[in-house]
Image: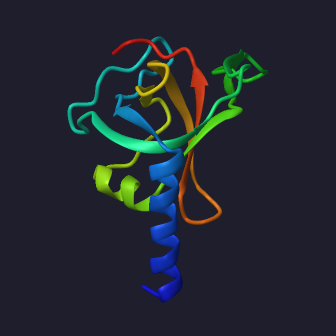
Amino acid sequence: MSLFDDIDGSLQAAMDHVFGEAIRVLPQLAGGNYGAGAPDPARPPLDTRAIISRAPNTGKLDFAGTSRRGVELSLAPSECWMDRAAYAALGYAIRPGDIIELTEKSCVRVTVSNVALGDHRDIVIHFTAGASAP
């Protein structure tokens, strides 16, 4: 790693400490077309921290489209940023369909719709409202 990587990692950790919130990652097995997933026994629930951005109109849209199987669209203006070291410490990848419980301020459960690499090699997790209890 370079000096820049060391400084960047320290900055990400400091931002998490100041702006981050406690979250619980609840991994789920794929639910398929007819229902929600079930807890994934191969990926245990873990507590960590992330910086949360909430939007009031977060929701899930279902659009049948013209395909036989239909298309699921997600409106995901809410998201969180996770420090790359904290993400690596989970020991597994967060996947669409997993549930994140925002435990610090609101105790709300949201469903992961997308996981992407952020601008600074952090992890950006988009989510939609309405996660059911596992």
**Image location of residue 1, percent across then percent down:** 42, 85
**Residue 45 lies in what quarter of the image?**
top left
**Image location of residue 97, percent across then percent down:** 47, 29
Q: Foreground: 39 or 80?
A: 80
Q: Foreground: 112 or 102?
A: 102
Q: Foreground: 75 or 102?
A: 102
The residue shown at (26%, 39%) is: 43
In the figure, 71 relative to 23: above or below?
above
Quarter in which the C terminus is drawn = top left
Instruction: Count every numbered label the image shows and give the total.
Output: 0
Please indicate whether residue 46 sits to the left or right of residue 72 in the image: left
Q: Foreground: 116 or 71?
A: 116
**Image location of residue 5, percent across then percent down:** 49, 79
Please indicate whether residue 37 sits to the left or right of residue 122 in the image: left
Q: Is residue 8 visible?
A: yes
- Residue at the far bottom: name it: 2
The residue shown at (38%, 54%) is: 86
Q: Is residue 82 visible?
A: no
**Image location of residue 76, percent across then percent down:** 68, 31
The residue shown at (36%, 28%) is: 28
The residue shown at (51%, 26%) is: 111
Colour mapping used in the image: rainbow
- Residue at the far front: name it: 18
**Residue 99 lies in what quarter of the image?**
top left
Please indicate whether residue 47 sits to the left or right of residue 124 in the image: left
In the figure, 12 relative to 63: above or below?
below
